[in-house]
Image: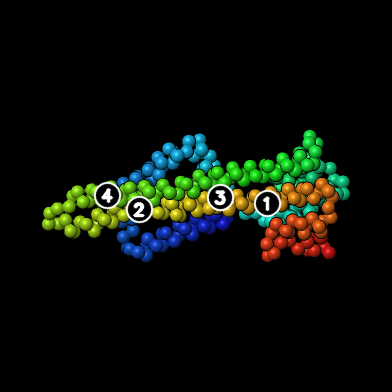
Amino acid sequence: MNIYSIIGFTAASVVLGLGLFLSTSNVGMFYDSVSLFIVIGGTVAAISISFPIPALLKLLKVFFTRVIKGSQVNYKNTIISIIQISEKYRTGTPIPALIEECDLHFLNEALGLLEDGIVDIKTLTLILNERIENVHELYMRDTNKFQAMGKYPPAMGMMGTTIGMVVLLANLGGADAMKTIGPAMGVCLITTLYGVIIANLMIIPVGENLEDSANERYLQNKIILEGFRLMIKKTSPIVLAERLNSFLLPSERLDWKEVLGK
């Protein structure tokens, strides 16, 4: 469970709720069923035209698996795991035993291919690098879809506002016309409000979250690939740690002395 995403969504809901309650004592004025129908219905319709229905169902799965259930990458723990597996490999531990102990999916995948012995080390490294690049590209496709979806709610909001303005202007007339302009304008603008809320508190942040997650996984897999390559060469743990630290900012780097007790 990604607690940070949950906190973010909760904070967004609290800010929106407090903003509405603090702005007026009549919060019910912000509800309009027609506006909701236009914004949500129009957004769903536009998204359905842009992407096939199966792709939309996949995006829902991506949202739950990578945003809600996913977790942030801990690079230090990743390097520690690589050092531990590398040391056991260096001392002759069988690969099946290493796979059982390792909790890094991509490293397990690499160890499995190594155990199969189908290709040479150079080709194996090339295959793993291609997988990293291709998986990252697929992740970014999902990200781009969410970011593209973010443009529809505001557009539907403006469409609803335009419809409301047409109806408002068409019905102006009579002695009480001026008294109805204010309330009617408020209803017209509610669709714009709905569009802004859905886009900027839901869809666009999810897209940014997915992009950040994809980049984190990309860097983690690059670290794992380099660690795997050094592991095969039976590189010393100190050199391995320093080589892998080169992928990170100084503040994020692992202090190998604490891990190795030196």
The first of marks 3 and 4 along the sequence is 4
Q: Mark 3 highlights which residue?
A: 210
Q: Is residue 72 above or below residue 128?
A: below
Mark 3 and mark 1 lie on one chain; the one further toward the N terminus is: 3
Residue matched to label 4: 164
What separation in Å lies between label 4 and label 1 (alpha carbons)?
A: 50 Å
Q: CA distance from mark 4 to mark 2?
A: 11 Å
Whether the residues at callouts 4 and 2 have beta carbons within 8 Å, the answer is no
Q: Earlier in the sequence, mark 4 or mark 2?
A: 4
Q: How many angstroms separate mark 3 from mark 2 (CA)?
A: 26 Å
Q: Amino acid at mark 3?
A: Leu
Farthest left residue? 175
Q: Which residue is mark 2?
A: 192
Query: Which residue position holds label 1?
Result: 220
Give coordinates of residue 10: x percent, y percent: 49, 57
Label 1 neighbourhood size at 10 Å, few (<14), some (14-19), many (20+)? many
Task: Give whichever of discs 3 and 2 has the lower sequence position.
Answer: 2
Q: Mark 4: which amino acid?
A: Gly
Q: Are marks 3 and 1 in contact (CB under 8 Å)?
A: no
Using the numbered discs, state the Cα–Cα distance from disc 2 to disc 1 in whole angstroms.
41 Å
Specify which label sits upstream in the sequence, 2 or 1: 2
Where is residue 101 drawn, in percent x and y?
77, 47
At label 2, counting other C-alpha atoms closer than 10 Å, the crowd grade (few under 14, some 14-19, many 20 or more) is many
On residue 39, the disc is: none
| Alpha carbons under labels 3 and 1: distance apart | 15 Å
**Relative to residue 35, is residue 101 drawn left or right?**
right
Lateral position of residue 133 relative to residue 88, left or right: left
Whole-percent x, y for residue 83 in the image: 78, 54
Q: Residue at x 63, y 53 (%)?
A: 216
